[in-house]
Amino acid sequence: MSRQIFVNLPVSDLVRSVAFFEALGFSKNPQFSSDAGACIVVSDAISIMLLTHARFKDFTPKAVCDTRDAVEVLFSLSCESRSEVDELVRKALAAGGSTYDAPQDLGFMYSHSFVDLDGHGWGGLHMSAKPQATVGA
């Protein structure tokens, strides 16, 4: 069985957040969307569940992270090329996101990051050579 990942993210304005991710080129799956949440399809294996704060709190007794003060997680999306990394960040900025760094070129890997409308950290990365998997690491 091929595994999928569904990343649940709390958002303050569901409509604006859906528009942001659609502007990045991702699509909304209406089958798994409602007034309290929207399923954004990133790839065949990855979906982002954008959830209102009220709906997100149904899944955890813990407080929702205030991304103005703390980082909860950083997401990295693989890209086919350096230009796709740059285009992803360009789209994010045009859709109202921000960035806090410059592109980073390490030779074997090129990356750049952006922050979505709710302060979640994202990055695009292109690796010129796939790293070898290490068992037990």
Image: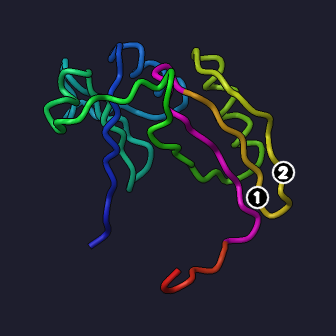
> Does residue 123 sit above or below 128 in this rendering?
above
Amino acid residing under circle 2: Asp
Q: Which residues are magenta?
A: 116-130
Residue 127 among magenta residues: yes
Q: Which residue corresponds to the image point at 16% horizontal and 36% vertical from the top-left?
A: 61
Which image quarter: residue 66? top left
Q: Position of residue 90 (x, y in %)?
A: 70, 27
In the drawing, what numbered circle is on residue 19? none
Residue labelled with disc 1: 109
Give me the C-alpha separation between circle 1 and circle 2.
6 Å
Residue reaching furthest to the left = 58
Which amino acid type is shown beneath numbered disc 1? Met
Query: Can you say which quadrant of the picture contains the N terminus?
Result: bottom left
Compared with residue 55, is residue 29 higher up or lower down, i.e. above or below? below
Was residue 93 drawn as part of the magenta stretch in this picture?
Answer: no
Q: Provide the residue designation for mark 2.
A: 105
Q: Tally the marks.
A: 2
Q: Is residue 20 above or below residue 74?
A: above
Pick the front one: 88 or 102:
102
Q: Label 2, secondary structure: give it.
A: strand
The one of 54 and 76 positioned closer to us in this rendering? 54
**Around disc 1, counting alpha carbons within 10 Å, would you say few (fewer than 14), some (14 to 19), or many (20 or more)?**
some
The colour mode here is rainbow
Residue 36 location, quadrant: top left
Q: Residue at x 70, y 43 (%)?
A: 84
> In the image, residue 57 lies at what x, y percent?
19, 29
How many other residues sit within 10 Å of disc 2, few (<14), some (14-19) or many (≥20)?
few
Q: In the rendered structure, are the residues bearing label 1 and label 2 in contact, judged by CB atoms less than 8 Å apart? A: yes
Q: Secondary structure at mark 1?
A: strand
Q: Name the spot of residue 4 as percent of width and height, x first.
A: 32, 58
Which residue is at the front of the view, 95 or 80? 95
